Image: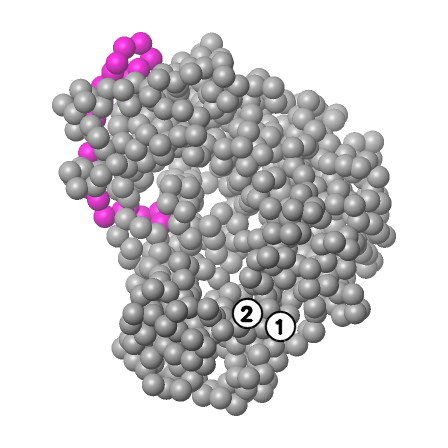
Amino acid sequence: MNVFSYSILFFGFLVSSLLLPLTTPVEAADVAGLPGVIRLELAGNALEAYPYFEYVRAINQGSTVAVAVDPIRYPEVAGRRADLYIVAHKTETEWAADPQLTDVRGGPQSVTFTTGDIRANTFLVDSGLLSGNADIGLGVPYDVVLDFNANGRLDSGDYIDGLGDEAGFYVVAPTQLPGPLAVSEIRYTGGSFLGQVTYYPTDLTSMGQLPLVVVSHGNGHNYLWYDHIGRHLASYGYIVMSHQNNTGPGIETASTTTLTNTDYLLGNQATIAGGVLDGHIDSHQILWIGHSRGGEGVVRAYDRIYRGSYSPVNFQLEDIILISSIAPTDFLGPGSTNPHGVAYHLWVGAADADVNGCANCSLCQPFHLLDRATGVRQSTSLYGVGHGAFHNGSGGLVATGPCLLTRPETHQLMKGYLLPLVKRYTEGNIPAKDFLWRPYEKFHPDGVPTHECVVVNLEYNEGAESMNFVVDDFQSPPSTSISSSGGAVTYDVENLTKGVLHDRDGTFTWVTSDPMNGMTVGGASDSTRGIVFEWNNADRTLSFEIVPERTNLSGFKYFSFRAAQATRHPLTIIELASRAFTVLLRDGNGVSSSINIGALGGAIAPPYQRTGCGTGAGWGNEFETIRLRLSDFLNNGSGLDLTNVVAVDFEFGPSYGSAYGRIGLDDVEFTLD
């Protein structure tokens, strides 16, 4: 975790205690005109292992949808019949005004709940026929209603998944496909290093003001090489400008051209191309995307405004709502290349032969930038993708390693993940968030490449000011026996070391003297810390005490952490496969419940098997975020008391998942969403 993270103990406790519990028993909705209506999560996917069902927000168009209720947790449903409706989503006000139920499938489905567990009470409600066509939006919203009195109305005693600003679930069309809008392109220049190409919806007259996406290319690249980004986003209602970038002298000049080109477009709307863009750019919603030196340059540009060393004319710091760096360099280090609190996203290609990620090249390690961000941060790492695969210009893939992805394959993945990213931060789009953290193995943009060479690792963290409860970010104290939240840490995993996530010896060759081998999260001047440890064909445990003032976790929705396999370590190469293990929550009455992360597709991927940077095979340690829904720990009558959780245990070894492993662990926390 980066050095700026912290736990806001008392205030976080106060806030969580005031929140409506997300995992409590059935509760009537407090909605005027709808007395006695009961809110409950219902829609999602069946699982083969415990918790046997996952409640989700986003479901790909063409995929099945299921509904489940656990009668052990909710015994009042056992033995009862209901008409199950899938309906177009309504807000609370709309439901109160019109509680009539109209099933989008043509009619309701009769379901009867048994006295069995959640597996016996899971019902297929759609075989992939529901529409996800949201025009330029992302996700068609649906609510699920269990009409127990069969009167065709939402009223007292009925259950609903929805009934608010958030729908029960969203069906999402393929995000890598073009949107419905025709796109126009204009090329123009405002002078030296002010050459620009802008993509925009052809018919702007009725569209009002649209967010602006600015693309800054890398060294030796060309601003015309990013039309896969420009045309894709413009077809969904964005204005995208790619500009000449002065990368040759270095990052400072690159940052300057990002700033001056953004200012030029905003200040000359009335004259560019006859004023076609005039009045249609929302200058308060600006997103910067940069590649290579341009990827560092956009971060430096933000840093310069943040520190007051540069003052734009036509926009200000708060207008930059997202920065996304594609395979960025790190020439300037933490004092100058720092995203601070802006929402930050990182793209990494594990086969990159330019910004290559090797331990002997600090400026070539993109993950440095991610961990310096103190706001919401996320990353999308693609195995087999080279530096040149991210653009569509001349030259090769600039890639080294096995199982290389082609440029068209890379662009499908980019477009599939980029649209939800942009929608999330420009619109607060709800289903878009699922694309930022749900494991690729279980959920990914529909239609992207899925062959055996495609591996996608996702990181997601909401930052220090999110009011999440950070159990341990490993920043302090130095002791391995006390967490950053003040609780005891006990373990019998082997060779546990806490320290800066930085490979110190400049090579990925495994040696015991460098326990952080393969870690490129931080550079020599960074302070981001975590732990590494191992287990060797024996059951082992790592336990974090929940301090007494934070044991009420009923106001939190997920347990979250990030983990990475250790490259070239004997316990990694003994079996080149994903590593699974179990998370256990324990309450003050001695009751516990556990979930194997593999059940949700979240096993930790092995390192990309690239050679170089020392002896052996395996590239840098790539973290991925795992999030487990707290309510899932209650399934099948576990009896766990979420108002009094005293410990969270990580369980490793043959009884709990993979027999062997060495991993890094960081950012252990409970999140509000």
Question: Which residue is pictured at 70% across the width and 51% down the height?
Answer: 575
Question: Which residue is pictured at 83% across the width and 50% down the height?
Answer: 488
* 669 in relation to 320, above or below: below
Which residue is tagged 1?
635
- Left or right of 20: which side holds 574? right
Considering the numbered disc 2 on the image, is that residue within a helix, a strand or a loop?
strand
Splitting the image into 4 quarters, where does residue 555 fall?
A: bottom right
What is the x, y in percent for residue 565? 68, 45
Question: Which residue is pictured at 31% across the width and 50% down the height?
Answer: 137
Of residues 221 and 179, the one drawn nearer to the viewer in this rendering: 179
Which residue is tagged 2?
53
Which residue type does callout 1 highlight?
A: Asn
Give, as a single range, the part of the protein colored magenta: 175-195
* 417 in relation to 273, above or below: below
Q: Is residue 108 visible?
A: yes
Near mark 2 (Cα within 10 A), the count class, few <14, some 14-19 or many ≥20, is many
Which residue type does callout 2 highlight?
A: Phe
Of residues 226 and 431, the one drawn nearer to the viewer in this rendering: 431
What is the x, y in percent for residue 546? 76, 54
What is the x, y in percent for residue 290? 43, 27
Question: Which residue is pictured at 58% across the width and 83% down the height?
Answer: 75
Which mark lies nearer to you, 1 or 2?
A: 1
